[in-house]
Image (cartoon, rainbow, N blue to C red):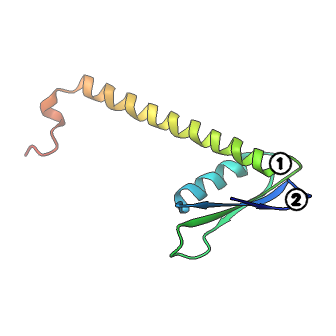
Amino acid sequence: MEHGSVTDASASTFSVVEEDHTLANSVRFVLNQDPRVAFCGYSIPHPADNKVNIRVQTTGDPAKDVLKDALQDLMAMCQHVRGTFDNTVADYRANKPAEQMDVDQK
């Protein structure tokens, strides 16, 4: 849900339910790398609530568009990390005999 001004699209607060610090801090990090962002921060209204508020203020672009771009960038980063991890695991398994990979062996 977006909470913002009708007259100023460059500043908005977005409420995301069923999320916590994990997503909010990652989004905040990506947003702060964007030169279009003047301010970005997040808060969790109450520890018992599964909700996070993300505040975005831009240098002029609509905050909704900047947030959408940041989320797409974060998805690309996660896909890259997952792909790198999967490739490394596959390489490890291909180069090690199966008996050496058994962590329960004594």
Q: Residue furthest top?
A: 94
Residue at (45, 31) in percent of width and height:
83
Q: Neighbour class for label 2 at 10 Å: few (<14), some, many (≥20)?
A: few
Numbered disc total: 2
Disc number for residue 6: 2
Residue 62: x %, y % from top left: 83, 48
For this rendering, which residue is in front, 51 or 76?
51
Q: Residues within 10 Å of mark 1 (few under 14, many from 20)?
A: some
In the displayed structure image, the side of residue 30 where residue 85 appears, left or right? left
User: Label 2 amino acid?
Assistant: Val
| Circles 1, 2 touching at the beta carbon (< 8 Å) | no
Q: Quadrant of residue 35?
A: top right
Mark nearer the N terminus (1 vs 2):
2
User: Please, what secondary structure does the residue beneath circle 1 have?
Assistant: loop
Residue sitting at x 52%, y 61%:
18
In this figure, which residue is indicated by the disc labeled 1?
62
Is residue 38 found left or right of 44 in the rendered image?
Answer: right
Q: Residue furthest right?
A: 7
Q: Is residue 37 above or below residue 101?
A: below
C-alpha separation, residue under disc 1 versus residue under disc 2: 11 Å
Q: Horizontal and vertical percent for residue 21? A: 55, 62
Residue 7: quarter of image: bottom right
Q: Amino acid at mark 1?
A: Pro
Give residue 2's quadrant in the image.
Answer: bottom right
Q: Position of residue 104 (x, y in %)?
A: 12, 46
In the picture shown, does residue 69 fall above or below 50?
Answer: above
